Image (cartoon, rainbow, N blue to C red):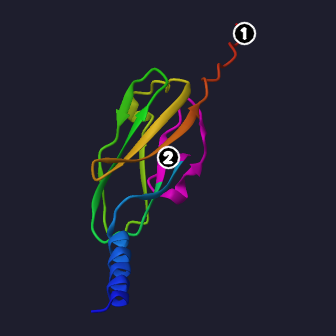
Amino acid sequence: MDRRMWAGLAVVVGLLLAACGSGTQGVQPASGDGVRPIDLTETASFAANDDLNLVITMKTHSGSAPVSATFIDPTGVSYSTDPIEAGRAAGQLVLGLDFESHGGLQWTPGDWTAVVYVDGKEDQTVQFNVRPPVSEPLGEG
């Protein structure tokens, strides 16, 4: 084989390997009570009693890989999601923390970090904010 053929073969193999790699293309924080991206609202600022979600857009991949996330509050307390398997057809996934499952306690206000893991390896990190709870005025009486 001549040098050009080897170079062409190397490019083709490189493109095939890149297409097989798992990972995320993008991660967007979103609020709402749903499991599909269409049911959620992308935001970087959550109420203290919102469900905290991440809409994860996967890169093209040929296999499957577990995807999980760890949410870290301003005091350093972390909350991890259960992993979900991103199969070959997975375009977008939703991972999140359900407010009601958290016991109805308000999320800690301030700046949060979410770390997304693909196949056990850190893939992307995003930041978002949880607003302080709105106090309700006391009634007269």
Disc 1: CA contacts within 10 A as few (<14), some (14-19) or many (>=20): few
Q: Farthest top residue?
A: 141
First of labels 1, 2 by sequence position: 2
Q: Answer whether residue 47 is magenta in the image.
A: yes
Disc 2: CA contacts within 10 A as few (<14), some (14-19) or many (>=20): some
Which disc is residue 33 wearing? 2
Residue at position x 42%, y 65% from top? 59
- Which of the two discs, 1 and 2, sits closer to the camera? 2
User: What percent of the width, then of the height, locates residue 1?
Assistant: 27, 92
Image quarter for residue 2?
bottom left
Question: What SS does tag 1 mark?
Answer: loop
User: What percent of the width, then of the height, locates residue 28?
Assistant: 53, 50
Q: Amino acid at mark 2?
A: Asp
Q: Amino acid at mark 1?
A: Glu
Q: From the image, tell me which residue sits under label 1.
A: 140
The magenta span reads 29-55
